[in-house]
Image (cartoon, grey):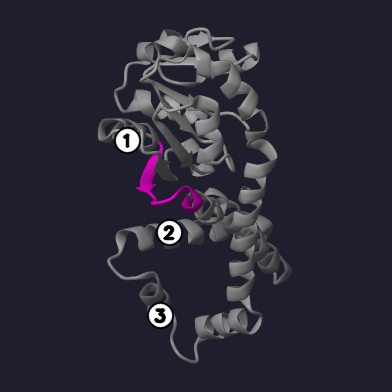
Amino acid sequence: MATSLIGGLINKGYPARSILACDPSEQQREKLKNTVPDGSSLGIYPDATKANKADVVVLAVKPQILKQVAQDLAPRLKPDAMVVSIAAGISMQSLQLWFGDRAIVRCMPNTPSLIQKGASGLYANNHATQQQKAQAEEIMSAVGIVQWVNTDEDIDVVTALSGSGPAYFFYLMELMTEKAVEMGLSREVAEKLAIQTCLGAGTLAQESTDSLSQLRENVTSKGGTTHAALQSFNQDELPKTVQNAMKHCAQRAAEMAKEFGD
């Protein structure tokens, strides 16, 4: 995700020489330098010794190690540096405990950010100025769309909706492909049609002025083939299945806040 953010910023015209990155893995450092445009101009280090130069610090690490990283990083930061965390499940309360009274933005991106098609939810604490919020939005906009939410708890909802959401669509495409193969299509044909159908539906929804329910109705003739499929979805309680899945996802995010937080 860090590589995607750095590459997205550079592609949008942000100078590579103004970006510092650190990773203890030499392999990862070399990969970053060779992956992003103008990677040789980046400041890439094995540790965070240069963090005192940063105006914005993006924490792109696993939630399991964020507390350790934060405790090492916090004393090095400038008092007015803003922290942006993209670690799943780590609450604003924990981030403020580790970093103190400074501007902090909690963010939940998703994996399509890897191809600049991401969706990110953002929440800022009261210390973040409008200028700093604009900076955070600019960074995350480099890899997709950005939506601000009203509470820290809303980020867990974003996790259940768009953060984990790509996996839901991948799973549905898997299931559709498997059934089409069972019904006689080759796997290659079935998979390509499933992927393109998902892509086309998403693009149509994005570009249309119709609501999602209206778009569904537009392709559903009463008594027709689509109507039969949707009736089957309802009979098998698909709405309940989706609701339960998102509820469990959000609950797990809250559990992670307790496990890896304070």
Dot 3 corresponds to which residue? Answer: 217
Q: Mark 1 packing: few (<14 Cα in 10 Å), some, or many (20+)?
A: many
Dot 2 corresponds to which residue? Answer: 202
Residue that appears at 37% across and 31% down: 139
Q: What is the CA distance from the residue labelled 2 to the residue labelled 3?
A: 15 Å
Answer with the quarter of the image where residue 207 lies.
bottom left
**Residue type of the residue flagged with mark 2:** Gly
Tell me: residue 122, above or below residue 220.
above
Check disc 1 and report the residue beneath it.
133
Comparing 16 with 66, the one in front is 66
Name which residue lies at 29% across and 33% down.
129
Residue at the spot 35% in from the left edge and 58% down from the top edge: 206
The quadrant in which residue 234 appears is: bottom right
First of labels 3, 1 by sequence position: 1
Q: Nearer the viewer, residue 63 or 236?
A: 63
- Please indicate whether residue 231 sits to the left or right of residue 183 in the image: left
Residue 21, position as x, y percentages in the image: 49, 16
